[in-house]
Image: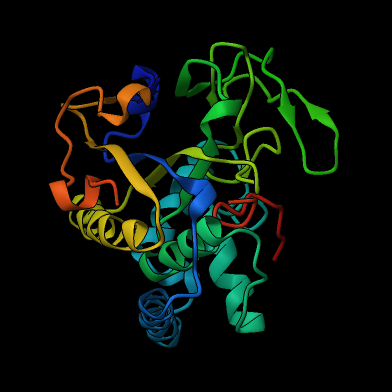
């Protein structure tokens, strides 16, 4: 399988950076152990500090996505990136509903870093994912059971079967590939556009490579995506990475999004 961004996306958004991780063992994900609770508490404290320091629109990570959405012709107060939607909801409710241990963990990581994170059930993805401009033929399944066709030139996550696994880039994920209780293999993607994206994504990756194995999830492959290294290729056969510049250490690799991380629902100002 693979993950990549098409060249026109890079041309339009040269500051784009991403971290991708292919994982398995999701069926065994846990969240109730002591180290997991401590990790979540520490991340939640970072979220509280972030919210106390600035509004969502003033955060550089969010401001960069707002600018990108505006350039795509989208009203940024109507279509918000997933991390902004999560932070706004948490600011109002000081809590998020639980959906799945993996997604719940990724949600709090997304808020702590203000970086949108998507996670896809790899068994529902055909061949791999390309982030590209839609041609209008792609099919997107909503959480209300409806079928949509993204507008031409809208940025979407697509596979070779023509499924749109997201709409409006980091706004809303498809019900087709959302993580569920049946999911065992998943692809995690964090993307950023702000000036310190590379450094912040490296820190986010360090968090994931520590937190995921603690929860019982095995990291199969990982790659930091930038203008010179644009593609992750991975395979679950034998449990070994397909190759490349994985930044994951041996201990993290060892045998040891749902819609809200991943939250792609519409929220208006």
Residue situated in front as seen by the camera: 35 or 128: 35
In the picture, measured across the screen, residue 185 lies left or right of residue 148, that is left
Q: Quadrant of the N terminus?
A: top left
Tell me if residue 49 can be seen.
Answer: yes
Return the x and y of residue 236 as percentages of the image width and height: 37, 26
Return the x and y of residue 78 as percentages of the image width and height: 67, 54
Number of residue marks: 0
Residue visible at 55% across and 17% down in the picture = 126
In the picture, measured across the screen, residue 47 lies left or right of residue 241, that is right
Residue situated in front as seen by the camera: 106 or 72: 106
Residue visible at 37% across and 29% down in the picture = 12
Residue visible at 49% across and 47% down in the picture = 26
Tell me if residue 234 can be seen.
Answer: no
In the picture, measured across the screen, residue 53 lies left or right of residue 204, that is right
Residue 214, picture quadrant: bottom left
**In the image, residue 139 above or below residue 206:** above
Q: Quadrant of the C terminus?
A: bottom right
**In the image, residue 150 above or below residue 82:** above
In the picture, measured across the screen, residue 184 lies left or right of residue 49, that is right
Residue visible at 46% across and 20% down in the picture = 128
Return the x and y of residue 62 as percentages of the image width and height: 43, 60
Return the x and y of residue 106 as percentages of the image width and height: 46, 59
Residue situated in front as seen by the camera: 76 or 133: 133
Q: Colour scheme in the image?
A: rainbow
Residue 134, picture quadrant: top right
**In the image, residue 55 above or below residue 4:** below
């Amino acid at each position: 399988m693979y993950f990549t961004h098409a060249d026109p996306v890079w041309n339009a958004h040269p500051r784009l950076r991403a971290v991708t991780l292919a994982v398995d063992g999701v069926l065994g994900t846990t969240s109730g152990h002591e180290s997991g609770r401590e990790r979540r508490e520490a991340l939640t404290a970072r979220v509280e500090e972030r919210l106390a320091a600035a509004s969502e629109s003033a955060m550089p990570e969010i401001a960069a996505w707002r600018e990108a959405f505006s350039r795509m012709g989208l009203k940024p107060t109507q279509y918000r990136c997933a991390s902004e939607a999560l932070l706004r909801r948490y600011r109002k409710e000081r809590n998020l509903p639980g959906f799945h241990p993996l997604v719940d963990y990724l949600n709090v990581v997304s808020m702590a870093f203000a970086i949108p994170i998507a996670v896809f059930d790899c068994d529902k993805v055909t061949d791999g994912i390309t982030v590209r401009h839609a041609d209008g033929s792609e099919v997107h399944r909503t959480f209300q059971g409806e079928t949509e066709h993204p507008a031409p030139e809208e940025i979407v996550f697509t596979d070779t079967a023509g499924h749109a696994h997201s709409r409006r880039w980091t706004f809303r994920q498809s019900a087709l590939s959302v993580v569920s209780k049946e999911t065992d293999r998943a692809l995690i993607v964090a993307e950023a556009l702000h000036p310190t994206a590379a450094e912040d994504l490296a820190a986010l990756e360090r968090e994931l490579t520590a937190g995921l194995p603690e929860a019982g999830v095995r990291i199969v492959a990982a790659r930091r995506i930038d203008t010179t290294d644009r593609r992750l290729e991975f395979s679950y056969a034998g449990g070994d990475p397909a190759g490349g510049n994985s930044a994951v250490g041996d201990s993290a690799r060892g045998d040891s999004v749902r819609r809200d991380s991943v939250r792609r629902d519409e929220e208006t100002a």
